[in-house]
Image (cartoon, rainbow, N blue to C red):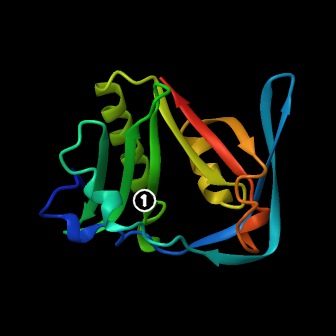
Amino acid sequence: MDIVALNAQNRKDINRANQPFTVIGKLKPSLCDGKWSCTEELFPVPRTKSYADEEDCFYDSCIGSKDRRAYLAYEEGQCVGQVVLHKDWNGYALIEDICVARDYRGRGIGSALIERAVEWARSKGLQGLALETQDNNLLACRFYMKLGFCIGGVNTLFYRNFRQPYRDEIAIYWYLLF
Protein backbone atom coordinates (compact mmCIF):
# COMPACT_ATOMS: atom_id res chain seq x y z
CA MET A 1 0.00 0.00 0.00
CA ASP A 2 1.13 3.52 -0.79
CA ILE A 3 -0.15 6.64 0.97
CA VAL A 4 0.53 9.90 -0.83
CA ALA A 5 -0.46 13.52 -0.34
CA LEU A 6 -3.18 14.88 -2.59
CA ASN A 7 -1.72 16.78 -5.53
CA ALA A 8 -2.76 18.03 -8.96
CA GLN A 9 -1.88 14.67 -10.58
CA ASN A 10 -3.92 12.41 -8.27
CA ARG A 11 -6.78 14.86 -7.65
CA LYS A 12 -9.04 12.82 -9.94
CA ASP A 13 -9.00 10.06 -7.30
CA ILE A 14 -10.72 12.01 -4.53
CA ASN A 15 -13.98 10.52 -3.29
CA ARG A 16 -13.36 7.15 -4.99
CA ALA A 17 -13.22 5.51 -1.56
CA ASN A 18 -16.34 7.29 -0.30
CA GLN A 19 -18.72 4.33 -0.49
CA PRO A 20 -21.74 3.22 1.56
CA PHE A 21 -21.16 1.52 4.89
CA THR A 22 -23.19 -0.77 7.12
CA VAL A 23 -24.96 0.55 10.20
CA ILE A 24 -25.30 -2.29 12.71
CA GLY A 25 -26.19 -0.34 15.83
CA LYS A 26 -25.22 2.67 17.86
CA LEU A 27 -22.81 3.65 20.58
CA LYS A 28 -24.41 4.94 23.77
CA PRO A 29 -21.89 7.10 25.63
CA SER A 30 -22.46 8.29 29.19
CA LEU A 31 -20.49 10.62 31.42
CA CYS A 32 -20.09 9.79 35.10
CA ASP A 33 -17.69 11.58 37.46
CA GLY A 34 -15.87 13.12 34.50
CA LYS A 35 -15.21 9.79 32.75
CA TRP A 36 -16.84 8.54 29.57
CA SER A 37 -18.07 4.99 29.23
CA CYS A 38 -20.17 3.41 26.53
CA THR A 39 -22.49 0.59 25.78
CA GLU A 40 -23.72 -0.62 22.42
CA GLU A 41 -27.20 -1.09 21.07
CA LEU A 42 -27.29 -3.49 18.12
CA PHE A 43 -30.06 -3.05 15.57
CA PRO A 44 -32.17 -6.12 14.68
CA VAL A 45 -31.67 -5.37 10.98
CA PRO A 46 -28.51 -3.67 9.68
CA ARG A 47 -28.92 -0.92 7.12
CA THR A 48 -26.70 0.95 4.71
CA LYS A 49 -25.72 4.59 5.00
CA SER A 50 -23.65 6.85 2.79
CA TYR A 51 -22.24 10.35 2.88
CA ALA A 52 -22.37 12.78 -0.02
CA ASP A 53 -19.07 13.61 -1.70
CA GLU A 54 -17.43 16.83 -0.59
CA GLU A 55 -17.22 19.59 -3.17
CA ASP A 56 -14.00 20.02 -5.13
CA CYS A 57 -13.02 23.24 -3.35
CA PHE A 58 -12.88 21.26 -0.09
CA TYR A 59 -9.99 19.24 -1.51
CA ASP A 60 -8.40 21.99 -3.60
CA SER A 61 -7.62 23.87 -0.41
CA CYS A 62 -5.40 20.96 0.71
CA ILE A 63 -3.02 21.16 -2.24
CA GLY A 64 0.02 23.22 -1.29
CA SER A 65 -1.39 24.26 2.08
CA LYS A 66 0.79 24.27 5.18
CA ASP A 67 -2.22 23.89 7.52
CA ARG A 68 -4.42 21.42 5.58
CA ARG A 69 -3.60 18.02 4.15
CA ALA A 70 -5.30 15.20 2.32
CA TYR A 71 -3.75 11.77 1.85
CA LEU A 72 -4.86 9.06 -0.53
CA ALA A 73 -4.20 5.34 -0.03
CA TYR A 74 -3.47 3.19 -3.07
CA GLU A 75 -3.44 -0.56 -3.59
CA GLU A 76 -2.26 -1.79 -7.00
CA GLY A 77 -2.75 1.67 -8.47
CA GLN A 78 -6.34 2.03 -7.24
CA CYS A 79 -7.36 4.68 -4.70
CA VAL A 80 -8.90 2.76 -1.78
CA GLY A 81 -8.87 5.30 1.05
CA GLN A 82 -8.48 8.93 2.00
CA VAL A 83 -8.08 11.16 5.03
CA VAL A 84 -8.44 14.94 5.13
CA LEU A 85 -7.28 17.00 8.10
CA HIS A 86 -6.31 20.50 9.11
CA LYS A 87 -4.51 22.29 11.90
CA ASP A 88 -7.28 23.45 14.22
CA TRP A 89 -7.27 26.47 16.53
CA ASN A 90 -7.17 24.32 19.68
CA GLY A 91 -3.86 22.52 19.12
CA TYR A 92 -5.33 19.41 17.50
CA ALA A 93 -5.36 18.19 13.93
CA LEU A 94 -9.03 17.88 13.03
CA ILE A 95 -9.83 14.97 10.76
CA GLU A 96 -12.58 16.25 8.51
CA ASP A 97 -12.99 13.07 6.49
CA ILE A 98 -11.70 9.52 6.52
CA CYS A 99 -12.98 6.65 4.44
CA VAL A 100 -11.93 3.31 3.00
CA ALA A 101 -13.53 1.65 -0.03
CA ARG A 102 -15.97 -1.09 0.94
CA ASP A 103 -13.99 -4.03 -0.47
CA TYR A 104 -10.81 -2.90 1.31
CA ARG A 105 -12.15 -2.41 4.83
CA GLY A 106 -10.59 -4.50 7.57
CA ARG A 107 -7.19 -4.65 5.84
CA GLY A 108 -5.36 -1.99 7.87
CA ILE A 109 -5.85 0.87 5.40
CA GLY A 110 -7.79 3.02 7.86
CA SER A 111 -5.13 2.42 10.52
CA ALA A 112 -2.40 3.39 8.06
CA LEU A 113 -4.27 6.59 7.19
CA ILE A 114 -4.57 7.46 10.88
CA GLU A 115 -0.85 6.77 11.31
CA ARG A 116 -0.10 9.19 8.47
CA ALA A 117 -2.40 11.78 10.07
CA VAL A 118 -0.52 11.33 13.37
CA GLU A 119 2.81 11.88 11.59
CA TRP A 120 1.50 15.07 9.97
CA ALA A 121 0.03 16.39 13.23
CA ARG A 122 3.25 15.74 15.14
CA SER A 123 5.28 17.47 12.41
CA LYS A 124 3.09 20.53 13.02
CA GLY A 125 3.67 20.41 16.79
CA LEU A 126 0.03 19.53 17.51
CA GLN A 127 -1.07 17.64 20.62
CA GLY A 128 -3.35 15.05 19.05
CA LEU A 129 -6.06 14.21 16.56
CA ALA A 130 -9.73 15.09 16.85
CA LEU A 131 -12.75 14.00 14.82
CA GLU A 132 -16.51 13.67 14.97
CA THR A 133 -18.75 10.81 14.00
CA GLN A 134 -22.33 9.82 14.66
CA ASP A 135 -23.48 7.45 17.37
CA ASN A 136 -25.03 5.13 14.76
CA ASN A 137 -21.72 4.65 12.97
CA LEU A 138 -20.88 1.91 15.45
CA LEU A 139 -18.24 0.23 13.30
CA ALA A 140 -16.35 3.53 13.03
CA CYS A 141 -16.69 4.09 16.79
CA ARG A 142 -15.22 0.65 17.44
CA PHE A 143 -12.38 1.43 15.03
CA TYR A 144 -11.50 4.67 16.83
CA MET A 145 -11.59 2.99 20.24
CA LYS A 146 -9.32 0.20 18.96
CA LEU A 147 -6.78 2.82 17.86
CA GLY A 148 -6.78 4.48 21.28
CA PHE A 149 -9.14 7.40 20.68
CA CYS A 150 -11.21 8.51 23.65
CA ILE A 151 -14.51 10.33 23.78
CA GLY A 152 -14.14 14.01 24.58
CA GLY A 153 -17.78 14.99 24.32
CA VAL A 154 -21.15 14.51 22.67
CA ASN A 155 -23.63 16.88 21.09
CA THR A 156 -27.26 15.76 21.16
CA LEU A 157 -28.48 18.76 19.13
CA PHE A 158 -25.87 18.85 16.35
CA TYR A 159 -28.07 17.06 13.79
CA ARG A 160 -31.43 18.35 15.06
CA ASN A 161 -32.12 20.52 11.99
CA PHE A 162 -31.65 17.66 9.53
CA ARG A 163 -34.54 15.60 8.21
CA GLN A 164 -35.25 12.10 9.47
CA PRO A 165 -33.57 9.70 9.99
CA TYR A 166 -30.53 11.95 10.59
CA ARG A 167 -32.11 14.33 13.09
CA ASP A 168 -31.96 11.72 15.87
CA GLU A 169 -28.23 11.09 15.49
CA ILE A 170 -25.82 12.18 18.20
CA ALA A 171 -22.42 13.65 17.39
CA ILE A 172 -19.56 11.98 19.24
CA TYR A 173 -16.22 13.82 19.45
CA TRP A 174 -13.15 11.59 19.57
CA TYR A 175 -9.57 12.49 20.52
CA LEU A 176 -6.26 10.72 20.15
CA LEU A 177 -3.88 12.43 22.56
CA PHE A 178 -0.12 12.46 21.99
Q: Which residue is mark 1?
A: 107
102 w.r.t. 126: above or below: below
Residue shown at 28% from the left, 52% from the top: 61
| Residue at figure coordinates x 50%, y 26% from the top left | 90
Q: Residue furthest front?
A: 161
The answer to whether 4 is drawn above or below residue 147 in the figure is below
Q: Amino acid at mark 1?
A: Arg
Q: Position of residue 122 (x, y in %)?
A: 34, 26
Q: Position of residue 76 (x, y in %)?
A: 21, 68
Image coordinates of residue 162 in percent, x first then y, are 70, 68
Quarter occupied by the N terminus: bottom left
Q: Quadrant of residue 45?
A: bottom right
> Callout 1: few (<14), some (14-19), or many (20+) C-alpha neighbours within 10 Å?
few
Q: Outermost residue toward the right?
A: 32
- Is 149 above or below relative to 28? above
The x, y position of residue 85, in whole percent, is 39, 45
